[in-house]
Image (cartoon, rainbow, N blue to C red):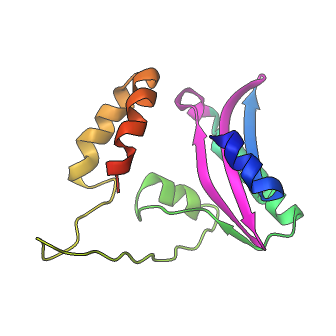
């Protein structure tokens, strides 16, 4: 998948990897359009968290964006108050509210789709405990049902 995105994106798409003793421990992808760069995907190995590889990863991405003349670095969407939101705030990211449109058929208000809502809490905890091969096998089957 990432190879296809990099190929389709050409010079606009970049893969960033943080290694520890030669082993990848964190990685991200950036896609540029004019002077704007977005991070559609970033991740780090859970067992490498104590080394804070995401700090080095984001520092490297920001350095590369600036070196290429980028003026806007889009950290991506986060739920206010959640861990990823706080991580991005420490880099001085400025939150921009995103608005969603809903077709309310049988409700008076839109559903709470935030990861911290009780609706998703149990599913998230269960997902974290799945063996990686199982998560990789069933993930594509259920991803279309996740908002």
- Where does residue 58 sit, x and y in percent of width and height? 69, 52
- Where does residue 136 sit, x and y in percent of width and height? 46, 29
- Where does residue 65 sit, x and y in percent of width and height? 80, 62
Q: Residue at x 28, y 74 (%)?
A: 102
Vertical arrangement, residue 76 with respect to residue 53, above or below = below
Is residue 69 one of those drawn in magenta?
no
- Residue 66, by quadrant, is bottom right
Q: Residue at x 76, y 59 (%)?
A: 62
- Residue 22, by quadrant, is top right
Query: Is residue 51 toward the left or the right of residue 22 in the image?
Result: left
Give the residues drawn in magenta, as a range: 21-50
Is residue 46 one of those drawn in magenta?
yes
- Where does residue 132 sit, x and y in percent of width and height? 46, 24
Q: Residue at x 60, y 55 (%)?
A: 40
Vertical arrangement, residue 110 with respect to residue 141, above or below = below
| Residue 146 seen | yes
| Residue 59 seen | no
Q: Nearer the viewer, residue 1 or 73?
A: 1
Quadrant the C terminus occupies: bottom left
Vertical arrangement, residue 75 with respect to residue 133, above or below = below
Q: Residue at x 26, y 48 (%)?
A: 120
Quadrant the N terminus occupies: top right
Q: Nearer the viewer, residue 51 or 109?
A: 109
Q: Nearer the viewer, residue 40 or 126?
A: 40
């Amino acid at each position: 998948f990432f190879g296809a995105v990099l190929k389709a994106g050409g010079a606009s798409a970049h893969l960033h990897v943080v290694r520890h003793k030669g082993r990848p421990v964190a990685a991200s992808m950036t896609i540029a359009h004019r002077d704007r760069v977005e991070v559609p995907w970033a991740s780090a190995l859970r067992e490498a968290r104590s080394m804070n590889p995401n700090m080095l990863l984001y520092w490297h991405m920001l350095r590369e964006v600036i070196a290429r003349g980028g003026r806007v670095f889009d950290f991506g969407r986060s739920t206010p108050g959640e861990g990823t939101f706080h991580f991005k705030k420490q880099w001085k990211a400025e939150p921009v509210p995103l608005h969603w449109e809903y077709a309310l058929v049988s409700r008076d208000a839109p559903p709470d789709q935030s990861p911290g809502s009780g609706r998703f809490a149990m599913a998230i905890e269960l997902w974290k405990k799945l063996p990686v091969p199982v998560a990789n096998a069933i993930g594509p089957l259920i991803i279309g049902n996740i908002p």
